[in-house]
Image: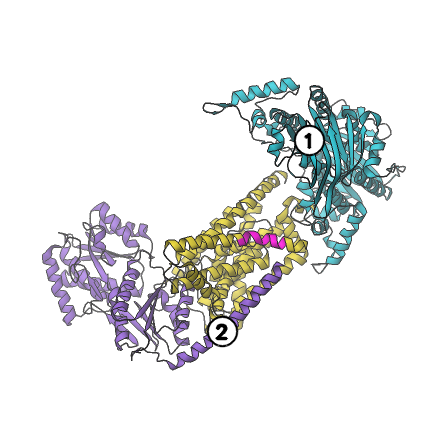
Chain colours: A cyan, B purple, C yellow
Amino acid sequence: MLLQMDSITKTYGNVTANSDVSFNLHKGEIHAIIGENGAGKTTLMRILYGMETPTSGSIRLNGKPVSFHSPTDAINNGIGMVHQHFMLFSSFTVAENIVIGREPSSPIGFDRKAAASVTDQLAKQYGMPVDPWAKVGDCSLGVQQRVEILKVLHQGAEIIILDEPTGVLTPLEVKELLAAIKSLAAQGKSFILISHKLQEIIEVADRITVLRDGKVTGTVQAADTDEEQLSKLMVGRDLVKLTREKKQSGKPVLEVNSLSIRGDRTKPLLSDVSLQVNEGEIVGIAGISGNGQSELLQAISGLLKPDKGSVRLLGQDVTGAPVGDIRRGGLAHIPEDRYQWGVSKEADVLENGLMGHTARHHKLGLLRGSSIRGMVAEWVERFGIKTGSLNTKAQFLSGGNLQKLIVARELAQDTPFLIAAEPTRGVDVGAMEIIHKELLQRRSAKGAILLVSSELTEVLKLSDRILVMFEGKIVGELMAETATEERISLLMAGGKHVG
Amino acid sequence: MKKHLVLLLTLVLAISVIAACGSTNNNKGNEGKSPANGGDTDKGKKQRIALVLPEQIGVNPFFALMDEGFKRAGEEFGVEVKTIESTDPAGFEQNLRTTVAENYDLIITATFQAEDALNKIAPENPDKSFAIIDTVVDLPNVRSVVFREHEAAFLLGATAGLSTKTNTVGAVVAIDAPLLSKYTEGFKQGLAYTNPDAKFLVNYVGGFDDSAKGKELAILQHSKGADFIAGMAAVGDLGVFEAAKDLGFYASGQDVDRTELDPEHIVLSQLKGTDAVAYETVKAFANGNFEFGAADYGVKEDGVGVTFITKDSKSPLSPFIGQETVDKVKAIAEDIKSGKIEVVNPLAK
Amino acid sequence: MDKVTATLRSLVQPLLAVIVGLAVGAIAIVIVGGSITETYAEMWRGAFGSFYFLTNTLTRATPIILIGLGVALAFRAGFFNMGSEGQMVLGALSAALTAIYMPGPGWLKMIAAIFAGMIAGGIWSAFAGWLDAKFRMNLLITTLLLNYIATYFAAYMVTYPFKDKTGSAAMSQTVMLGREAWLPKLFQGMTLHVGFLLAVGVTILMFLFMKHTVKGYEIRMMGGNPLFASYGGIQRGKLMLASMFVSGGLAGLAGSVEVLGTQYRFIDGALTSPGYAWSGIMATLLAGSHPIGTALAAILIAALQTGGMGMERNTDVPLEVSSIIQAVLILFVSAKLTYSFIKRKKAGAKNGRAL
């Protein structure tokens, strides 16, 4: 047994994050840990990586008891971690990032050439090609992830912790990453994989440990399980199968006509995009991120002025109108990047919840505290948002809970039209279920929804029609009934126009 | 928890304030009885005199000298003296008020910058004694001590008139204000007395702290033929000195002996005895012959003067002036002292 | 409990800054050969030692509070208004000229002067905001540079066209205001004037405004994350101009009450040499832009200054030592400032790209 964590318990005040958790790892094994947000996965990994000390319990490495007091301890003992948010210097080269902290030196200082050759050697050894001289900031997220893994390997890691490694990757990059993990495992490296994506985990992991409320609810062999069983272990009950009611025909709510945005790059960010979303309809937009989806949504919601074309909401021309006017005209917006657009981290839950709702909660310009409190408290209850109190600052909420807060806030705007961009990014299965249910309910109530998601399964599951974007253009439109993952993937990669 | 602490602190503060308030009132009660004027010396208690300055002394010779004379008098006459500098006008007013509250027997202040505050505070405290140096505040409980700068300027002008080779002299003056006409008019009278044909150039800098412009104007006057230029522009004088050194003409400074800076070019300095005045004020108060109203100090009282003429200098005498001229002007100074020559004060017109 | 801990935590940094400031001051006192306890006792006495000294401190705090509040408002909205000095000077000049030249009864002159001061300060500040909105000129730089224009313009006005030609005429200043336009003193023979009550009133109003009004909420959100605010439909341009106007208006008010309540005329340099503006900015930083905290910090800074004067009056320790303590304070506060400034800079860069 390479690593053994026995009866780990960790409490913060009266909150128990891990309760009697045991976990082990063989050499060359890929062991996944899954669980809902706040189930205790992150705490467990922080303990292993030396960022927290357990309240009780022991860790043994190769049979010897160890205790880490800092990540440096963990690294020196062959444990490496790739965080969800990459910790790279974007203005440094790939090689510089990989050798950081263990730089090869020449008599006059840092030896750039040696660093590059070390990088080349690592890349070859582990089958993860990178360009040592490229600036990290210019690399795609998939390559950046490779750099992170190579960095950890360069530090001599035998055990590699990957926290949500596929969250930001394109389907192709995910495939490459999973293949790389498998090949590294075959070379004797061991992996601990934290993820929400059950399908990927079943595909790549050897064993899967499920956590719920800080306790282990089961450790299963990946070969013997399926998504349903895992979901049940995570949520503690059977998940309801969502059913989509038959689509009702309705009047157009959003009409976008040949919208174009030049941008300062050579290729236009958006070129001649037209689309329409009707009452009681969910239109999904699929595409690899960075193909114009963000700009399209920003142009619709008034955050970005289009160079050409028009946007009509409920028959009103709102092209280039101020955001406030468009929102009042009937738009709600779940933003794709919650930290950038969706919240103010310094503000508390109440204040973040109030955005866009002030008109309904004031008297002569004075905020009505109790009615705001009541509104947000109801969301917290309904969506199961885990927060210390309504006055907890947003920065102390986990990403999933914050997402639930944003979704609740935007659904509560109760507008005829809703933009839902990556509505379930980073949320757990239970919350995903709630959010999907709410979106479908909105559809049944004759709401119009424009859904943008990098999760093909989500798009397929919810949409009535699916548009595929590639390089700022809509390259295909498919009806839900006839769409398949393969067809969409082909279009997303810039394949031929279909249908 | 912290809120309670703050509350507690506030309470403590409030109580101490009330207590202190009571004790201040007591002080005021005493104050009413004690003689306001130090005329009859109280044997039991040392007299206390404060010198409150509107600026920090820093390197300003005007104030440094005043402080020196003030302290010397304090030692000699057994009076407790305290010099208080201020950072800014608001702070000055507070300092002045505080010395009133702290019950000093005499409060001395100085310069036109102090006028406003004294005009406010002196009438509010009619039984306190004040003195102000270098400007007049016409109030019943204020002694104003001013200088007859025009007399010194007369001597300076007379010396310049005897020394100039080009028959052209100049003056670079801070601003065109009545106060400074004492300098220019006095100079003009002295110049006319010794050298009626000499040309006199006057230019104004427009402020007290612009040495660059002072230099510019000095260069201009030199180009018009002036071989002696009197600096009357406070910091602007430094520009005049610089120009004198660059172009090789002669200059004079103000207030203290500036010849020490560059004896080759700065050949004279018009002196203002702030030390003597501060000293005399303390002395008068200690000896019981302190009077309110205006007093002025001229050449006779050694309140003003010119280097080499009324006071020796460490610097060597410049050949531009020459001992002969010095002797002649010394005689003029004696005539001023005796009243044989009367220098007209332009402000008195 | 949550709030108590939060307040406690927010107090740690300013208290630490004060303690370290005093400790470094103690070293300075020892170096100049003074007694630490005696010096600090005199400092305390000079600031709070009696009712008289307390009012002195509060008088000095009055303009600092008002400026601090103005800066705090701008900071909360995410804008670095470093132009308080110029806004204050223009406000003071406008107030003085209005009080001198406006006909009518005293109370009318007084109120008109106060409003003139606020409007002048507000317009000067909003002008910087407009330059940012229209030409994307960096607000930090424009506000800072507009200070020079304002102070030199005011200096020109009182050196030439509006100069007091009576008396020795050696000072660049306006004539004295008529007695009827003076802000009443609160206590006989003490410097404290009605302006202090105004400052207290504005503090409370600002606190309530920020916490309990829609506009206050919008301002805080814009300061917290400008992208979030614009995403939520808050119009940055309008709100920015409005908050810059109020911010500068408060600086103008500070200048007005200083003229109407203390100096009774506009004197060139009388508002800049005490460094009211920078003390106000410091108070804001010390208190993390919290209105009531800013007012308290302003009183603390004023106390350091009046205490320093007391120390200078009654010990042989020079005034500079209290300046050293103040400087150390700034140093420790600025450590926090640069940190938060860099954070905001990053957000700003993103903002520029996205909008």
C243 vs A390, nearest the viewer = A390
B288 vs C122, nearest the viewer = B288
Q: A208 above or below B290? A: above
Quarter holding the N terminus of chain B is bottom right
Q: Amino acid at mark 1?
A: Arg
Residue situated furthest right in the rendering: A246
Quarter holding the C terminus of chain B is bottom left
Name the front one of labels 2 and 1: 1
- Residue C154 locus on image (x, y percent): 44, 58
The answer to whether marks 2 and 1 mark residues whose Cβ atoms lie closer than 8 Å is no
Q: Main secondary structure of the magenta part?
A: helix
- Residue B244 locus on image (x, y percent): 23, 49
Residue B349 visible within the image: no
> Residue C11: within the magenta?
yes
The crowd level at tag 1 (other Cα within 10 Å; few <14, some 14-19, many 20+) is some
- Residue A146 locus on image (x, y percent): 65, 25
> Residue B147: within the magenta?
no
| Residue on which disc 2 sits | B21
Q: Amino acid at mark 2?
A: Cys
Q: A81 above or below C151? A: above
Q: Secondary structure at mark 1?
A: strand
The region drawn magenta spans C6-15
Protein chain holding label 1: A
Residue situated furthest front in the rendering: A64
Rendered image quadrant of residue A66: top right
Q: Is residue A260 left or right of residue C337?
A: right
Q: Secondary structure at mark 2?
A: helix
Q: Is residue A50 left or right of residue B106?
A: right
In the picture, the disc for residue A60 is 1
Q: C84 above or below B73? A: above
